[in-house]
Image (spheres, coloured by chain):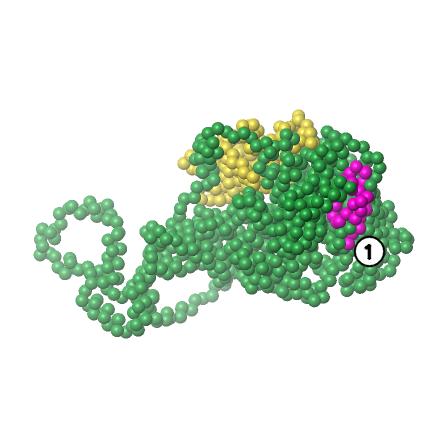
Chain colours: A green, B yellow
Amino acid sequence: MLTKITRSVVLAVLCLAFAPAAATTVLSQSKPRPSDKFRQLEEILPTPNEQRAASGAPGRSYWQQRADYRINVELDDVNQRVTASETITYHNHSPDTLSYLWLQLDQNIWRQDSDANLTQTAPNLDGRVPLSQIENMLHARSFEGGYRITAVRDARGAPLKHTIVKTMMRVDLSQPLAPGASVAFSVDWNYNINDERKISGRTGYEFFPKDGNYLYQIAQWFPRMAAYNDVSGWQHKQFLGAGEFTLEFGNYRVSITVPDDHVVASTGVLQNPNAVLTPVQRARLEQARTAKNPVLIVTPAEALANESHKPTGKKTWVYHADNVRDFAFASSRKFIWDAQGHNVEGNRVLAMSYYPKEGNPLWERYSTHAIIHTLNVYSRYSFTYPYPIAISVNGSIGGMEYPMICFNGPRPEEDGTYSALVKYGLISVIIHEVGHNYFPMIVNSDERQWTWMDEGLNSFLQYLSEQEWEENYPSRRMSPQNIREYMASADQVPIMTNSESIRQLGNNAYMKPATALNVLRETILGRELFDFAFKQYAQRWKFKRPMPADFFRTMEDASGVDLDWFWHGWFYTIDHVDISIERVRLFQPLTGNPELDKGALMKERGEQPQTLTQERNQALPKRVDEFPSLRDFYNTYDALVVTERDREQYRQFLQTLTPRERELLQTGLNFYVVDLKNIGGLVSPVILDIEYADGTHELMRIPAEIWRYNSTETSKLIMTNKEVRAVSLDPRLETTDVDIANNSFPRRPVKSRFQLFKEGQGQPNPMQLEHKQPSPAPTQ
Amino acid sequence: MKFAVYILSLALVVVASGLPVAHVVSAAAAAHKFHTSFTVADYNAPERSLQITLRTFPDDLEKVLGRRSGKAVRLDRKKVTEPLLVAYLQETFRLKNAKGETVKLNWVGMDAGVDSAWLYFEAHLPEGCAGVELSNQFMFDLYDDQINLVNVKQGGRKHALTFKNGDRFQPLAPR
């Protein structure tokens, strides 16, 4: 449809003369200040130093603290309480002398006077409020949560001065802790466990009214060392609920005492199987190590029998974990337990799932498979899974991650059926939470400060893993089309916003960074460069604490591509991608050959429509026809008819040209200029699909640097000897362009989802066409 | 000084805590959920109709309808679910015309996938969008931090609205 493309005839191709310098214009007093979207990030990022190198790698003097724990804990199944004591050995690897230490008291978020409670805004009481919500509000008000710290002592047993500051505790050392020195001290405490269905928050118990049993998922349950690092000093930003955890690595030895009919799932390796497992269970566990499918350690029938059991005493399960930043466990007499050994790139891992009967038939089929799948895919993109254990536990918690263990919620209905939603919800959440072992459990980013560093990166790898589970897996995140509405919306904060201040956490800290990385991988760097750089980041920072700049710098350092514009646009602004093809102009060179040039102009003139008046006037008798003597030269002269003089001038013109110039003249090239406008502000590569009149297509992938001189308007030249019929932008929806109505020229009407749906109403659906009879509802 | 008194209307169904619907979580949301709905409201001038597409998360939708009806709700059982959904929409997605009268929503249908549920409905607005106001309280009864984004398109003009808990009526289009 060339008629809609502006046609201009230019003589420029062979015009070798220089245009005179533009006349001097008076400088405007109000100079426009175009924003420089390619401005370098150096001035925003912290200056590289000995701890953090300019390449994004840990610097030559990188250091981090270490905390080792020995904990004895007892779970009270009658009163739902935890009572415990710990000895922490804290190693000061920093260059600083510390006269006090800070610990995190996360349970204090449930004190009645906690900042989290006091700053909670009023709930919505419009509409119909279920009684259960009122019940939960009343329950929360009467819950006596929070740590009761009963003792803090030094290594010799003498009391240590300590001050509780909301969710933190300062312990004053009797002697300052010098660089390189270690100190051991102990803490005793107890607390009431929250009913997770009423007061939710990553840990708690679930009560099963039908059989009267409890299922415990225990986390944030011990006073943990606050992190002390080169960027924040003590990271003791209060726990308000959204910003998760900032922790130090260490070794743990934890003795967990529970009723003797409970089964415990835990971070770490079980040290005393002979004391807590039956010979049959130990034999099954041995068999599981080399099995090709999950092997039941506790069968559904055995778990069902346990449900009506009463404990006769207590058992203590002892676990040891090396180099973890946290420790969590679960315990219940309801647990069914399966396990399968798996070799992840040479590391033998025992993948295990623990779930009550309410989780079946979904859990027995999918959980352990999903764990192993996650370890395979994540290891390929980052580093080999280093731990010996990987566990997924079903309870009331929707999804929460800890080292080697995670808690996942989805269950089928009571009749054992489930919707596709629940099935994929379960697989996705297990992939996500097991995947957190890599980010942030091992690449130990500061969650309290930057949610995106673990959730964004993890959601990105979650998507890659889901797409390797089955073809066209219904991934909720990451497809560039799914983020368009959010990107276009006004109520946003940049990704680089502190965890507690983020609005729309899911969209901001999960989906947007994950989508950004997807765009970076597929559209900007390509898979090979991206995967190399991403893996570099993961390998450089495993078992260390990276900051945002370390990620940005490593990705550039390893890919060899300046991505400052990308980090700036996606992470520091709320701009979105909306590029419009404003118009396409055609320039055709005059060849100088009068036969061709005048012919082309004559053809163009011939294509002009005859006006209505011209048409009606045509039949009128004309005076010059009646009196032919009135005709002269001008009645026959046509400026577009080639004259002998034209031909002579052309001959002379050709003699002035070199052979190369003569060749260029005869190529018959068309010059199309595609004018682009950046409406959304976010700089993006430009992907153009050129459709020619002969039906062929050409794809032009233009890097984002096309916007570097002018980030609001730019244009691209297409030189071709074919005729262009249409140009469209981002034909495969890879750039998150929010408005596709302006992505084609000539404009093509884009039907809205609403219109498509409405038009499809009343049509039989594909399944109805396929099977004349409805298929029975799935039972499994 | 007197306080305005509002009647707290309690749903007369007690949702048992063990109900399966309560177990459904936003897929893979870790401890954080995506509490957002996305709406495109497109004024179709020839039909004098505001055509509305609301995208939400299917698990949240099952949860809120289950909470209100006191029984487990599955979106793939449309016959039972659609009447609940229409009633919920009429209550939470409210349009007022320039005279202040409530505009009825006409249900078109639903597309429920695993990752998103799309609700289609329209409102007859013979006078166009001028003076029309919207209150989008969708899911506010389920999540305090729910945010509803609405992009309104009318004759080539676009306008973005954001509804947070506590927000009431907002003009559909800027004057």
* Rendered location of residue A651, percent (x, y): 23, 70
* Rendered location of residue A511, percent (x, y): 59, 48
Return the residue nearer the eye: A211 or A110.
A211
* Rendered location of residue A352, percent (x, y): 69, 44
Question: What residue does disc 1 label?
Answer: A89
Instruction: Tell me the residue at 13%/50% (across/down).
Output: A622
Report the span colored magenta: A251-278
Return the residue nearer the eye: A197 or A421.
A421
Instruction: Tell me the residue at 39%/53% (across/down).
Output: A697
Instruction: Tell me the residue at 26%/58% (across/down).
Output: A601
Return the residue nearer the eye: A587 or B81.
B81
Residue A180 seen anywhere in this rendered image of the structure: yes
Q: Quadrant of the N terminus of chain B?
A: top right
Q: Secondary structure at mark 1?
A: strand
Instruction: Tell me the residue at 55%/44% (across/down).
Output: A470
Answer with left or right where residue A664 lies relative to residue B110: left
